[in-house]
Amino acid sequence: MADALRDKRSGLAPCDFDSVALDTHIGRVRGLEALPVRSDLSAYDCRNNRLAQIGLELDGFAAAVAQASERHGAERVGVFMGTSTSGILETELAYHRRDPATGALPPGFRYAETHNTFSLADFVRRYLGLRGPAVVVSSACSSSAKVFGNAARMIAAGVCDAAVVGGADTLCLTTLYGFHSLELTARGPCRPFDAQREGISIGEGAGFALLERVEARTAAHARLLGVGDSCDAHHMSTPHPEGLGAQLAMRQALQSAALSPADIDYVNLHGTATRTNDAAEDRAVSALFDAATPCSSTKGATGHLLGAAGITEIIISLLAIEHGLMPGSAHTRQLDPSMGCNYLIEPRPARVRRALSNSFGFGGSNCSVVLGAAG
Amino acid sequence: MRAFVEGIGLVGPGLSGWRASRALLAGDAAYQPAPTSVAASALLPAVERRRAGMPVRLALAAGIEAIEGAGCDAATLATVFTSSDGDCDNVHAMCESLATPERQISPTRFHNSVHNAAAGYWGIATQCRAPSTSLCCHDASFAAGLLDAASQVAMSRSPLVLIAYDHPYPPPVSAMRPISASFGAALVLSPQAGAGAIALLDIEFEARQAAASRMADAGLEALRSGVPAARCLPVLAALARGTREPVLLDLAPHSHLRVTVTPCA
């Protein structure tokens, strides 16, 4: 991922998902169709849990969780997952195969283990053999950022000693046709903050992090410094034009981190590439941060991962800190001249001590997370 | 973790508000099931009132009753929404449309499909910009919501409203996921006892299996076991009785919440 950000690579390509005939670009994970979940959890087999399983096995993550589980006890490790559509694709496809006489869904359809929003946390908890509290936050595109707040509170309250946080969202008909119905999908790859931007590119992804208290053993690891969340109280699918809710989330994240805007070296924007999101977010960021603070959206590289956008961009912010690299903005050609923030089109090598990541969703749900280097 | 109950809201089959249902929850009056009746909230602007589905109505009715009872300001109170299945009518209608050759779904259906739709409509109705979360834990969604709410009250030292709601799927999903009725319940929880505090809840997560508390009345027990959000009924019954008692709520497999209800004098 760090190399891809340095090279400004993008995973977006013309839509070839299932039987979908829409003129749009997507970020599809190749080969998922041939990678079922672990056989003892086959009841949970669906595209969303398949992608979650791949994520859990990358970078030694499952092994690190196993060590934490051994250290603290499996009942002291919680699971806090974000997803928007979970395994709804299974239900969508089952509706294509209803019994012509009775209307019944086909045999083998499993609702609780696939479609239900909790399926992801249930799967992850079982996959990792954990016995602490488990829950899904499903607040559209802020879901897997908000889970950092739930987990941090549960650790602070002494209910858990460690927490697996993150999320997964995968391609489905609901989001592809739904965003299309709102005229929010771009034809070509999405171009965040571009003067000619015309909407989002939908992608899929899964990402995870292990949270533990700061102590001698964990002192060398990156820090979760603060989480802020708010509501727009404005409209179900359009952000507040001045980004009032977004401002409030960023202020609260900084407040909970006991930091001021000047302490932030880089802002990873929600930056979906819709006309309204980018304009409102620019106003919110400009109202809060010095005009020189570098910002960028990485959705030109990944697409909009919806419920998995938060964890993905928090991981990107952590990579920015670890590698000293502020990501650029793949596919953005000409910056919208009305934007006030210091938007990076090209990646910039620079020391990043602290980063703030924004995630905003339908229903006016906003979340900002502040991350920092060790020490 | 501890939190004081400052206000209660309730809407369900034969349950028209906490005040009206208190005697039957306490076992002092007979429970008569009747279809859940709830109007769209007058707090919503006309467009949103038209667009709001039954789950949104349930959440708003229960939440507003609890807040009015607590004498809180809805515009500043943090919210925790929890539901097993969200807007099932809407999911069904979308899946039907997506199974046609045209695959056309309406923008309103799409934005109503997010699990946090109730939170979105709540924000528009109350003009509240305070933190809000929308949770799911399948059958244990109420218990997971209560645990999260308790951790928020403990950490933020601020009150909030917890709102649990569920509404049945129509066929064909109802065959796989039967939910017996429409139900909503809400608790205003606070770190300090206000003048009208109803009870103190001591809430502990326990990582072992235990038998969940049940309702003595057969009709209320059928409701408790038939609707995920109605798993809160034993807590409401303890609050209605006004006696000190422990309530056990199932959580994810092999765990539960122990909720000790202590009435305020």
Image: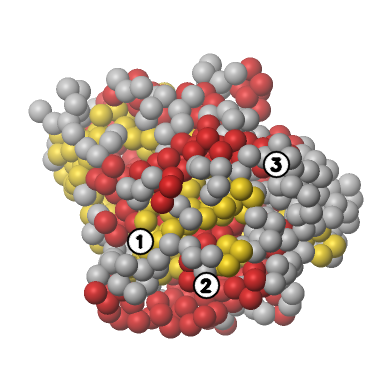
Find numbered disc 2 in the image and state the secondary structure of the residue it sits on.
helix
In the picture, residue A67 is in which quadrant? bottom left
Amino acid type, label 1? Pro
Q: Position of residue A335 (x, y in %)?
A: 74, 47
Secondary-structure class at tag 3: helix
Q: Which residue is mark 1?
A: A133
Chain to which the residue tagged by mark 1 belongs: A
Please tell me if label 2 and label 3 are on a single chain: no
Residue A209: x and y in percent read: 45, 68
Q: Residue at x 89, y 47 (%)?
A: B102
Q: Quadrant of residue B19?
A: top left
Compared with residue A99, is residue A76 higher up or lower down, i.e. above or below? below
Q: CA distance from mark 1 to mark 3?
A: 31 Å
Q: Can residue B71 be seen in the rendering of this structure? A: yes
Amino acid carrying mark 3 in the image: Phe
Direction from residue B128 to residue A191 in the image, left or right:
right
Residue assigned mark 2 = A323
Residue drawn at point x = 25 percent, y = 54 percent: A157
- Residue A24 point in image, percent of width and height: 84, 55
- Residue at image coords 32%, 23%: B72
